Amino acid sequence: MTSAPAITARGIVLNCTASSREEAVQLCGQALLECGAIEQPYIPAMWERELLMSSYIGEATAIPHGTDASRKYVNFAQLVFLRFKSEVDWEGDSVKLAIGIASANNDHVDTLGVIAEILMDEKRKNILFSTDDPHEIIELVQKAFSK
């Protein structure tokens, strides 16, 4: 398995608000930027990618990320977690959790697999959707990548 992307408390927002899918994607991009993982041009590429194909993956979760061409704006692999106070409409689906991904290569495919494994495990999924402790999310994700 590939190495785990960075995940820090700075990139975890547990009481977020977004009025639209576009705003939610923008907030994910801004969080990645604030973590230093990306350059600013990656953010509009995340929305461009979203318009090509929805990042909704089920389980009230979306995984916004940039286009292949935008990988040149990624400084290092990073995940950010935004959990919304109220569900965000995602083309007819309801999203409570957006996991923004920055990846400069195809490692994001393995990252998506790990996220899917977490979401299929009811106990770990409940932690993502209910904990008030960012460090609990960090530990959960780091353990998932160490398997």
Image (spheres, rainbow, N blue to C red):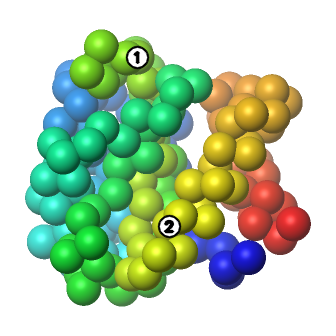
Relative placement, left or right, of 130 versus 93 is right
Classify 10 Å Cα crowding around label 1: few (below 14), some (14-19), many (20 and above): some
Q: Earlier in the sequence, mark 1 or mark 2?
A: 1
Asked if residue 79 shows in the view, the reply is yes
Q: Position of residue 72 (x, y in %)?
A: 24, 85
As helix, strand or loop, the secondary structure at mark 2 comes to helix
Q: Is residue 133 above or below residue 93?
A: below
Q: Which of 144 and 81 is in front in this view?
A: 144
Q: Do the residues labelled 1 and 2 touch (CB within 8 Å)?
A: no
Which of the numbered marks, if any, corresponds to residue 108?
2
Q: Which amino acid does label 1 sit on?
A: Ser
Q: Position of residue 43 (x, y in %)?
A: 19, 61
Q: Nearer the viewer, mark 1 or mark 2?
A: 2
Q: Nearer the viewer, residue 52 or 25?
A: 52
Instruction: Please report the residue visible at 16 percent of the width from the left and 62 percent of the height from the top.
Output: 45
Which quadrant would the N terminus be assigned to in this image? bottom right
Q: Which amino acid does label 2 sit on?
A: His
Classify 10 Å Cα crowding around label 2: few (below 14), some (14-19), many (20 and above): many
Q: Position of residue 23 (x, y in %)?
A: 19, 37
Which of the numbered marks, if any, corresponds to residue 123?
none
Q: Is residue 13 above or below residue 88?
A: below
Tell me where residue 32 sits by quadrant: bottom left
Which of the numbered marks, if any, corresponds to residue 94?
1
Q: Which of 2 and 75 is in front in this view?
A: 2
Tell me where residue 121 sits by quadrant: top right
Instruction: Please report the residue visible at 27 percent of the width from the left and 72 percent of the height from the top.
Output: 68
Q: Where is residue 82 in the image (x, y as percent from the top left)?
A: 45, 41
Relative placement, left or right, of 141 versus 40 is right
